[in-house]
Image (cartoon, grey):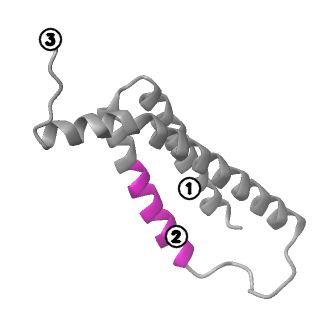
């Protein structure tokens, strides 16, 4: 795997972890801002992945490439775990937003 591609995965993981920290703190504006950063990073990753690879396809993967694939897999797993926890934390906030938008606002009596 191209080291540049791996750096994109690492940057997305960092943004994902930052999103989770912001969600835990209830800072949903920051979560949304970081989500936008993730979208940009993912777009850049897709573009970089389409560039021709330096090595020929179909050749056996070197030890470094195998390790890079393992690292990528671990990063993807952490991103998915972070995403699941963010979604879990967002559920009450999203329900409150839905209630507010549909006119079922809670009263404080």
Helix, strand or loop for disc 1: helix
* Above or below 6: residue 1: below
Residue at the image point whose x is 22% and y is 42% from the top: 98
Q: Quadrant of the C terminus?
A: top left
**104 or 4: nearer the viewer:** 104
Q: Could you tell whether 28 is left or right of 56 in the image?
A: left
- Whether 84 is among the magenta residues is no
Q: Are marks 2 and 3 in contact (CB under 8 Å)?
A: no
The answer to whether one can see residue 11 in this image is: no
Residue at the image point whose x is 49% and y is 70% from the top: 46
Please provide the residue range marked out in magenta: 37-50
Expressed as whole percent of the image width and height from the top left, the position of residue 61 reads 85, 75
| Disc nearer the start of the sequence (1/2) | 1
* SS majority, magenta: helix
Density class for disc 1 (Cα within 10 Å; few <14, some 14-19, many ≥20) is some
Helix, strand or loop for disc 2: helix
Q: Are marks 3 and 1 in contact (CB under 8 Å)?
A: no
Q: Quadrant of the N terminus?
A: bottom right
Q: Are marks 1 and 2 in contact (CB under 8 Å)?
A: yes
Mark 2 and mark 3: span between their CA atoms? 56 Å
Helix, strand or loop for disc 3: loop
Circle 3 sits on which residue? 109
Expressed as whole percent of the image width and height from the top left, the position of residue 89 reads 45, 34
| Disc nearer the start of the sequence (2/3) | 2
Circle 1 sits on which residue? 8
């Amino acid at each position: 795997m191209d080291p540049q591609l791996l750096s994109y995965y690492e940057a997305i993981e960092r943004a994902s972890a930052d999103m989770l920290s912001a969600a835990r703190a209830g800072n949903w504006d920051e979560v949304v801002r970081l989500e936008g950063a993730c979208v940009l990073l993912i777009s850049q990753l897709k573009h970089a992945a389409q560039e021709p690879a330096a090595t020929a396809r179909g050749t056996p993967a070197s030890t470094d490439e195998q390790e890079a694939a393992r690292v990528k897999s671990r990063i993807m797993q952490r991103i998915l775990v972070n995403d699941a926890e963010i979604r879990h934390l967002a559920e009450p906030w999203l329900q409150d937003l839905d209630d507010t938008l549909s006119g079922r606002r809670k009263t404080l009596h």
